[in-house]
Image (cartoon, rainbow, N blue to C red):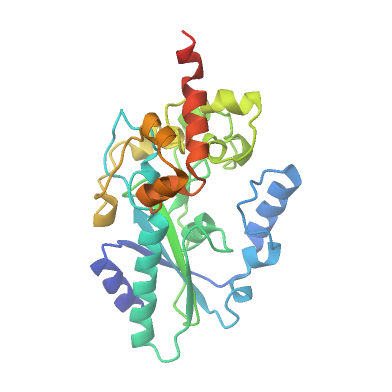
Amino acid sequence: MKNELKNYCSSLHIEDVGIAAIGPYNELAERWRQRLNKGHVTGFEEKDFERRIDPQLTLDNAQSVIVCLFPYFSGRNGDSNLSKSSITIDYHLVVQNKLELIGKFLKNKITGFEYKAFVDNGPLADRYLAYLSGLGYFGINSHIFADKYGSYVYIGYIINNHPFEPDKPLDKTCKQCGNCIRNCPGNAILGNFDINPLLCRSFITQKKGELLEDEINIIKKSPLIFGCDICQDVCPHNKAVPNTPIREFTENIVHKINNKEIKEISNKEFKRRYGNRSFSWRGKGILQRNFELINRDKNHT
């Protein structure tokens, strides 16, 4: 059945598929406690500690977790003001659709098959699952790296009640060259395979409310109004990655949002034009604020 699963995923242009054991993930629990104690959390994470480490609290008869990587790199554009992960149709929509196709395929193959699929919105730590299922290894910037596609990958997973045989983690890490540490705008990368996400520029560009002066200075270190690619772009593991084979991540690309357009259109029109883009989830006001902060000093000279 595992081979049939991988063959079907291949037909969807999903090359990297692995199986994570059902846990509970005690090693992750210890790491997570350390992050909580340091206050290195954004509020976007699963708040129930036990659900974060035990898949059976999400699906009570769970016996394995299917994990898939979805590469999204489609080239470099020096004029872009959006991160590479936000230039196409919202990856949540694309990946969730493919996970549901996998779930339905397995439902037709396995009697009594049950599943729950998640992409960036589930209780489990997706990067840890990708590591556990042998799909990638951790970089010092806390990203997961796949051998072929580097860290430009989304992660989706399917908690299910079939006892697929678990895969083994890769016994490797990134080169630890330090490029990401030296170039991170917020000095968020701690050098011990962990980060302080509160200093991550990507998080700050999505943060609501009034920003501190230090946060404003971090935002101004890149022209991107949403997200941040710096620690990935300077990484040698990402130097020669191929473009994604997933068609949805090569079409309907928007590299740049115009500040004048954002200012002039209504919230309703913004949602109509960009509601299916990941950069729209915080609304147009956040993008407008980031535009103004990035260009503030330029406008005074």
In depth, the one of 212 and 161 nearer the eye is 212
Residue 23 percent across, percent down from the top left: 60, 70
In the image, residue 191 sits, relative to residue 10, either above or below, namely above
Q: How many dots with numbers?
A: 0
Q: Residue at x 61, y 76 (%)?
A: 56
Asked if one can make out residue 144 in the rendered structure from this viewpoint, the answer is no
Furthest-right residue in view?
37
Q: Residue at x 27, y 66 (%)?
A: 12
In the image, residue 250 sits, relative to residue 293, either above or below, namely below
Where, by quadrant of the figure, is residue 208 drawn?
top right
Asked if one can make out residue 5 in the rendered structure from this viewpoint, the answer is yes
Furthest-top residue in view?
301
Where, by quadrant of the figure, is residue 15 drawn?
bottom left
Q: Residue at x 39, y 45 (%)?
A: 86
Furthest-bottom residue in view?
111
In depth, the one of 96 and 278 nearer the eye is 278
In the image, residue 97 sits, relative to residue 294, either above or below, namely below
**Quadrant where the image shows the N terminus:** bottom left
Residue 227 percent across, percent down from the top left: 46, 39
Q: Residue at x 54, y 63 (%)?
A: 122
In depth, the one of 170 and 36 nearer the eye is 36
Residue 98 percent across, percent down from the top left: 34, 67
**Left/right of residue 239 with respect to residue 298 in the rendered view:** left
**Left/right of residue 131 with respect to residue 7 in the rendered view:** right
Residue 88 percent across, percent down from the top left: 32, 48
In the image, residue 207 sits, relative to residue 24, either above or below, namely above
